[in-house]
Amino acid sequence: MLMNKNHEKELLENTVKRFVEEELYPHEETVDKNGEVPLELGRQIEKKSKDLGLFAANLPIEVGGGGLDYESMLLIEREYGKTSHALHAWAARPTEILLACNEEQKKRYLDPCVTGEKRELFALTEPEAGSDIMSMKTHAKKDGNDWILNGSKHFISGPVMPDFAIVFASTGEDETPRGKRKRITAFLVDVGENGFEIGIGTKCVSYRGYHAFRLNFSDVRLGPNQILGEEGKGLELSGKWLGMGRIWVGASCCGKAERLFELAKDWASTRKQFGQPIGKFQATGFKLADIAIELRAADLMVNDAVRRANEGKMSDADAAMVKVYCSEMLNRAADNTLQLYGGMGLMEELPIQRLWRDSRLERIWDGTSEIQRHIITRSILRPLGA
């Protein structure tokens, strides 16, 4: 880490390090092989995180959360990045979009998430509308005071079967200078509602045990108080927090790259070929140098983005740059580390192959590298009228 840390932040960082090393690392291999986190283990992680004050640490104290600032959350997310989402997700950081709940919704949705009584899913992605949100087919039509929801979502990730989902759906169209644009609304939909089916979807080779749920809605009737925020303001609402989500992806990528770097250094200094450690050969040593350089640059970018966020100056392009650079940096670090290990890097007895597989997903979720580059390009050209 590059930030200047005071005593409290050093204590926090050490606490999270111990938590990850003692409570999560020992279970990585078993979870990866079995493809799930046993419920008993998940509850154990959840309880330990509550004991340490890490559960819901991202939410304000006013709603019962830990009230940690961005710099503190950076420390947490970076350490969590060293292990699997399937494990650290049990130390929940409920999505901040729930802060938009009204008083009745807080009691029903936000408060139980803060205490761990309920779990939520953030349901945006669809089979035919991944990064192209405006192609969303899930829609809700007004029926009296209620809304009738139809459609489907996939790749909606979480560690355990949720209690409800934050579902984004089209509720009409608006005329804009660029043509018609769908109005996107966020709904709070309880698992068990008539017409709402949910199940674990296709299994992923990255972050095994961190499920990708598939959600189907068939004439699901929702009351007026199941709209989160305002009708037609779903994307604006989610946008308040999606940017920081991409910064946290960048932070977790830095954490995982650091873990890979430690493994690469150890191997390069102890593995011998032709009578000397392989790190002494330029072809090997330069790979270590590249990892070190790019990790330093990535950490600097994340720290800069957090500073901008603290000052209220972080833009979508800032977050996109962090997401692109850090995720692609991690992929290069993982590939170079595996190359240093050679065939051993692909053996299940070592964690290299798992970290390599897990790293690949970072360039895809929370917006692909291509979408991030589009955001950056748009920020460059739009001020020029293009």
Image (tube, grey):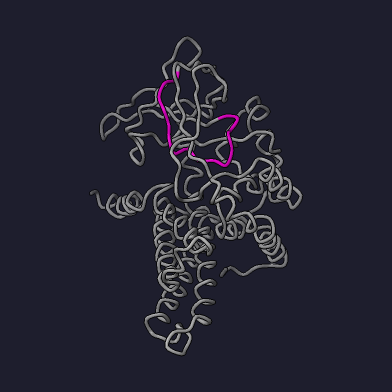
The x, y position of residue 267, in whole percent, is: 51, 76
Examine the rendered structure and indicate whether residue 378 appears above or below residue 235. below
What is the count of numbered marks? 0
Which residue occupies 36% across, 53% down?
Answer: 369
Which residue occupies 55% across, 47% down?
Answer: 34
As rendered, which of 374 and 211 lies closer to the eye? 211
Residues in magenta, as a range? 149-164
The x, y position of residue 254, in whole percent, is: 51, 63
Which residue occupies 71% across, 41% down?
Answer: 64
Q: Is residue 283 left or right of residue 248?
A: left
Does the segment drawn in magenta span residue 161?
yes
The x, y position of residue 310, in whole percent, is: 56, 56
Does the segment drawn in magenta span residue 99?
no
Q: In this view, does 373 lie to the left or right of 71?
A: left
Which residue occupies 65% across, 36% down?
Answer: 113
Examine the rendered structure and indicate whether residue 227 appears above or below residue 24. above
Q: In this view, does 23 lie to the left or right of 308?
A: right
As rendered, which of 143 and 167 lies closer to the eye? 167
